Image (cartoon, coloured by chain):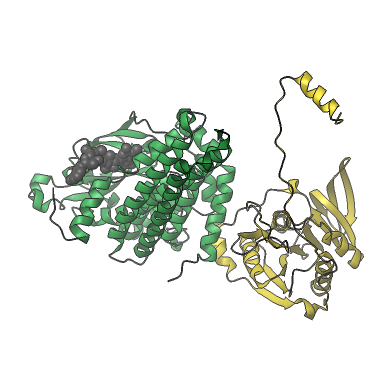
Amino acid sequence: MDFELSEEQKSILDTADRIAKKYDRAYWLECAKAKRFTSELWDELGKAGYLGITVPEEYGGAGLGMFELSLLQERLAEHGVAVLFFVVNQGLSIPALVRHGTDEQKSRLLPAIASGEKRFCFAITEPNAGTNTFKIESMAKRDGDDYILNGNKLFISGINQAHHVLVVARTQSYQEVGGQTQRKEGLSLFIVDTDSKGLSYKPMDTMLLNPEGQFFVYFDNVRIPKENLLGKEGKGVRVLFDGLNPERIMAAAMACGSGRWMIRRAVEYANQRVIFDKPIGTYQALQHPLAESMALIEVGSLMTRKAAWLQDRGDMGAGEASNMAKLVAADASLKASNAALQCFGGYGFTESQDMLSSFIGARLGTVAPINREMILNFIGEHTLGMPKSY
Amino acid sequence: MSDMKIMVGVKRVIDYNVRVQVKSDGSGVVTDGVKMSINPFDEIALEEALRLKEAGKAAEVIAVSVGPSQAQEQLRTALAMGADRGILVTTAEQPQPLAVAKIFAALYAKEQPGLVILGKQAIDDDAGQVPQMLAGLLDVAQATNASKVELEGESARVTREIDTGIEVIEIRLPAVLSVDLRLNEPRYVKLPDIMKAKKKPIETIDAQALGVERLTFLRVIKTSTPPARQGGHKVGSVEELVQELKQRGFV
Ligand SMILES: Cc1cc2nc3c(=O)[nH]c(=O)nc-3n(C[C@H](O)[C@H](O)[C@H](O)COP(=O)(O)OP(=O)(O)OC[C@H]3O[C@@H](n4cnc5c(N)ncnc54)[C@H](O)[C@@H]3O)c2cc1C
C-alpha cells in the first residue's frame, strides 16, 4: 500500500491551485449569480489539457483515470470553484462513451470533449421517475434509420450550456418488457444534440447557487440518427452503470473539497472574530465540530480515492466503494458546512459572507445525484445480504 | 543567433503559499513534509526563455538546479513547462550565492549559452546576488530586474525596473539577465507535457566535479520569527489620521 501521489498527480493538484487562483471564488460567484457558464475557467482547464484527463490518448486526452480526475475535482472544490459539468460530463458521459461508444462515435465526439470545445449534460430524471429510474416513460421508437424520441425530463443541469445531452429513454416500455422483474430491460442511451429540432427546455426554480442551473427538458418527436445510440438497444443499464459509479466518485470528491473549503473559511473567521474578549475559535464548542468534520472529510476523501482506484482497475468492487465514498463524503461535507455556518453566527446568513449557499450545496449532496437512502439500501442488500425493502 | 542555448536557473524553495515555521532550536526553518516548488522568479525566467525559443530566437533551453537530489522534482516541472533538458548539480549542503555563481560559471564554460536567465532573487534567502556575481565571474554583460526583454541579433534591449522608474538598456550577448515579477505570467504545466517530460534527460553532476569545493562563506547564527505585529487602532476621520501621523513623526 502506497499513499504517495505520483509526480503527475501532484502536478495536477498544483495546476488546479494555480487555475483556481486566477479564476477564484469571486469569479465563480459572479458566474453563478448571473447563471453564466464558467467559460474562462473551462477554457483555461482545457488549454492545460485537464478536460480530457480520462479520454484515451488516441482521442486527444491524457489517458489517465478517475483517480486523477477526482483529485482535480476535489482540489477545485477546495477553492470554492467546483464545476458541476465535471460530474455529468467528465464524470458520467465520458466513461460511458469510452467504454461503450463505437470507434466512429469515439472519434467523432471525444476529441472535442477532451479539448473542451464540446460538453455533455445528462438526462435521466423524470416527473414520475426519480429514485425509481426504471419507471422512466420517455420513449424512443425506431423509424427507418432513426429513432423518434418523446418525453419529459427535469432537473437537467446545464443543458443550456451543453452541446449534447446523454438521454436515458425506453425503447420498450416497462409493461412491454414484463414489469418489475424485467425492469432492467428495454432501457437505451442516446446521444442527442441540444440544438435538435423538437428539443426544448426552460429553467427550473431550484434555489441553488451554481453557474449551471437546472432545467425542464421536453422531447417532442426528436429525430435521433441510429448512429447516436450508445451501447446496444434495450441494454442501456450496462452503459448507465458504467457512468454512474464515476459520477458518484466525482460527487464524493466535490463534497470533500467543498467541505474543506467551508472548514477553512470558518477557521479563518473564528480565529479573528473576538467575542467575550477571545477569538471565538478558542471555544471548543466551535472547535470540536470543525475538528471532527475535518477527520470525517479525510475519511471520505480516502474512500473516494479507493473507489477511483478500483474503478480504474475495472474491479467489480468499484460499485460498492463508490456508493460508500459518496455516502461518507456527503455526510461529512454536510456536517462540516453545519459546523462552519455556526461559527459565522448571524453573518452566516448574509449574502456577502458567502456561506449559506455552500451549506445548501452540501445538503444537496445527500439527495443528488443519488440520495443516501438508496445508498444504504444498496449496502444493506448487496454488501450485507439483507432483504430488499422496495 | 537562432542556434543559441539559454541556461535558466531553477531553485527548489518552500512553496510561496506555505506558512513558514522556524525550527525550535533556531537553526533554520522547517522543510520536512513542506511543499516545495520552483522559486517563482525562476519560473518567470524559464517562461521568458521558452517564449524566446518559441519565437525562434533560441534553439535550446537548459534548466539548471543546484541543491539536493530532490530538486529533480523541480527540474521535472521545468521540463514539463517546456525546457529541453535539465542539469542537477548536487551539493552536500545548501550552497550560498558565490558557490552557486561559481557552479553556473563552470556550466557556462561547458555549455556556452548565449543567455543565462535567472530570477532576481530566491524567495527563501532573498539574497539576490547570484546573477551579478555570475556576470562578474564571466566578465559578460548583465541586465538585472528585467521587466521586458527584446533580442535583436547579437544584443538585447532590456527594460529594467529601478528605484527611480523604468530604464531601458542595450547589452551585448552573451549576457546574464535577472528577471522581475512583471516580465511575464508563467504558463501552467500542461497535462500531456508532464508525461513527455519523463522522457527528457536530466544530467546529474556533483559540484566538486565542476571544481567548486567550498559551498558556504557565511555562518548563520540564528533564525527567528519576526516580532508579532502590534494591533492598530481606528481613527474617526482624515483630520484625525493626519494629526495622529504628525504626532508620531511620520509626516
Ligand atoms: C441540483 C440538482 C441537480 C440535478 N441534476 C440532474 C441532472 O443533471 N440530470 C438528471 O437526470 N437528474 C438530475 N437531478 C435529479 C436527481 O438525480 C433526483 O432529484 C434524485 O435522483 C432523486 O429523485 P427525486 O427528486 O425524484 O426523488 P424521489 O424519487 O421522489 O425520492 C424522494 C425521497 O424519497 C426517499 N426514497 C425514495 N425511494 C426510497 C426507497 N426505496 N427507500 C428509502 N427511501 C426512499 C429518498 O429519501 C428521496 O430523497 C438533479 C437534482 C438536483 C436537485
Q: Residue A123: where, in percent of width, then height?
A: 29, 42
> Is any atom of residue A142 visible in this view?
no
Location of residue B245 by image quarter: top right
Pick whichever, B88 or A359, lies toward us.
A359
- Is residue B13 left or right of A141 when viewed as pictured? right
- Is residue A274 left or right of A68 when viewed as pictured? right
Q: Residue B158: where, in percent of width, then height?
A: 84, 50
Q: Residue at x 28, y 59 (%)?
A: A319
Q: Residue at x 83, y 75 (%)?
A: B214
In the picture, which chain is yellow?
Answer: B
In what quadrant of the picture does the N terminus of chain B appear?
A: bottom right
Using the image, determine if residue B238 lies above or below residue A45. Answer: above
Using the image, determine if residue A1 lies above or below residue A167. Answer: below
Q: Residue A383: where, in percent of width, then height?
A: 22, 61
**Outermost residue toward the bottom?**
B209
Count of numbered marks: 0
In the picture, which chain is green?
Answer: A
Q: Which quadrant of the figure shows ligand 1? A: top left
**Outermost residue toward the front?**
A276
Q: Residue at x 39, y 54 (%)?
A: A300
